[in-house]
Image (cartoon, coloured by chain):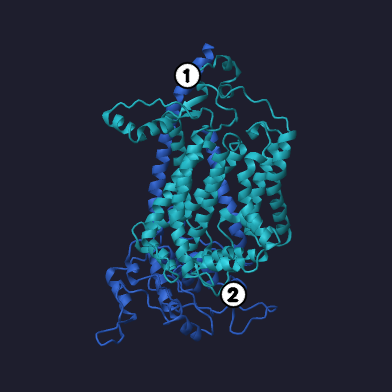
Amino acid sequence: MAHESTYTPSTGIERWLDTRLPIPRLMHDQFGVFPMPRNVNYWWTFGAILSFMLAVQIVTGIVLAMHYQPTTDGAFDSVEKIMRDVNWGWLLRYAHAVGASMFFFAAFIHTFRGLYYGSYKAPREILWMLGVLILFLMIATAFMGYSLVWGQMSFWAVTVITNLFTSLDTLIPGLGTTLVQWIWGGFSVGEPTLNRLFALHYLFPFIIAGVVILHIWALHIPGSNNPTGVEVKTKSDTLPFHPYFTIKDGFAVVLFCLLFGVFLFYAPNYLGHTDNYIPANPLQTPPHIVPEWYFLPFYAILRAIPDKLLGVVGLIGAIVVLFFIPWLDTSRIRSVSYRPIFKWFFWLFVICCLALGYFGSQAPEGWKLLWGRICTFYYFAFFLIIMPVVGLIEKPKRLPGSITESVLGKKDTSASGGNA
Amino acid sequence: MGNVLKLFAAAALVAFVLPGAGLAADAGHGTEIKAQEWSFAPPFGHFDRAQLQRGYKVYQFVCANCHSMNLLSYRNLGEPGGPQFPEKAVATLAAQAQITDGPDDTGKMFQRPGKPSDRFRAPYPNDQAARAANNGALPPDLSVMAKARPGGPDYLYALLTGYSDAPSDMTMSKGMHYNAAFPGHQIAMPSPLSDGVVDYTDGTEPTVKNYAKDVSAFLMWAAEPTLEERYKTGARIMIFLIVFAVIMFLAKKAVWSRVHKRDHAAKSGA
């Protein structure tokens, strides 16, 4: 919530800074006393978890880049050299690879949380759209990072995905081919491609970090949403960010690290594909080209659509549609907890996304292709048909009068005059 | 706490099950890979030194005739977490290989006995030579083989023990061999192991099964030489995190108890 500053500089250096670059004031107002709805649950800790994961990825990534060689002859071996001969190299490399999975896992939960509690609705549209932009940048970054290993799956993933642009040839003959050759820096995926993927993979996380700052800025104007979707009305509805949410977020980050640690130390290759331990070979296509698990739903959508260009449109549209949901959702209230009809469609959507993930990992044939198509249809119908229509016809359950009432019961509401 | 535990348990479940479903699908290729018992199974496992030393012997006398292992050096054989041959033995094993070095002062390449810092000597100078000597098939490099096939060491064991006569209804291509574990069941590599081909000096039965088990374990170490260090570091960090989580939970409870007390007072006072 955009609130009056309550900061009073107490030392000389703080007073000096306050009239020049008031970072202590910013920290005090935005991360110290910043009012958080008191009823936010543990699903709200994933913002902190994601910030932590971004830091992990950037720190491990920078050190890995010091040892990595972006050449077609050296890339695969340099990754293995990091694992074998660099001090703690195995930890850095596995933390970075597993970290990417953990990052997406947290990002998906964070996104679904926003979706469930209507965190995209006014006045948080820009906040939501910046989040979608971050997801989009994450997808690009992860894709480019995966290619750097230069194993079979890396190489063929780059080949398949960059080749998607050739579908533009159906619009303007030659456009797609020209574009793809420009991206490749040649007539096939090769060293120039690897070099630019490496350069951009190093750049993008810093763009993400920049957008994250905007995301937090946009969050701190209206303040956080909460499980009831009822706006903060009085001071008794909120608690200061510190210490209540610093400690809660901290606890959640430690729990998340435990999950991270299980994969990192005991199953670091479980989430990856064995084929990526075979060095890239342009002459031999792997039997099944599948992306990392976090791309599988999108991959399923791509393959569900029989036309190549429309498939690409579906792939990109699956993310782009998210930008518009603040206006596609016609509901007067935010939280799905109080929406008796939409609730069912929401959970069906969650199942649909998990199912798309499964179909993305399977060969697109028979009943799996059929159901992949049905799920793809539902994915878009959920946003484009169900969201606008259900919002209009549904009668929501009665909302609590205030956040305080939702926590303490009705008795307290008459007394909630900000005296707590 | 109940809620948050449920939440993270659900999250963990999804994280494990979802990609697993995807991976399981292409792991099989229509063959069944039986899981073996390995000394290095997580979370507390470690390599069996004697097994790795035997495995190296099998590799050296059998596999290395056709397969390279370019990512390994002889020095690795003496490093902690591996076969841990004594320093002298490593020097001897290295010296058994003739390494091409140079050019010398006259511009000529020359042969010399290997040193611990040398990479494992490759059997062929290049891929073309390897194919020419193997009926057109390229014996793959074995450095990370145990990570490069679904099933890992289980698959390697199944492959090495999976040779038999082809079923009567199957027509084999020329020069191919039937193998129950290999995808498609036709493999260019002839059965590499037979009872007694490698001498074991530690009393282990010199059988195909033991050779296969030992060399699979050796290849697992070759692919993951830091596995033991990873488990050990992991145990320390996981214990630290569990203790830290308990402290954080108690701290969180203590901090929030102020609010709950105030709520209680407000409720009973109203």
**In the rendered image of this protein, does residue A202 appear above or below residue B190?**
above
The subunit carrying tag 1 is B
Q: Which chain is cyan?
A: A
Mark 1 vs mark 2, foreground winner is: 1
The x and y percentages for residue B128 are 48, 83
> Can residue B230 be seen in this snapshot?
no
The subunit carrying tag 2 is B
User: Please, what is the three-letter code of the amino acid marked with disc 1?
Assistant: Arg
Q: Are labels 1 and 2 on one chain? A: yes
Q: Residues within 10 Å of mark 2 (few under 14, many from 20)?
A: many
Q: Which residue is identified by label 1?
A: B262
Q: Residue furthest right?
A: A393
The x and y percentages for residue B73 are 35, 71
The x and y percentages for residue A154 are 52, 64
Q: Which chain is blue?
A: B
Q: Residue at x 40, y 39 (%)?
A: B243
User: Is B48 placed left or right of A100 in the picture?
Assistant: left
Q: Which mark is residue B108?
A: none
Q: Which residue is identified by label 2?
A: B179
Q: Residue at x 40, y 35 (%)?
A: B247
Looking at marks 1 and 2 on the same chain, the residue that comes earlier in the sequence is marked by 2
Quadrant of residue B81 in the image? bottom left
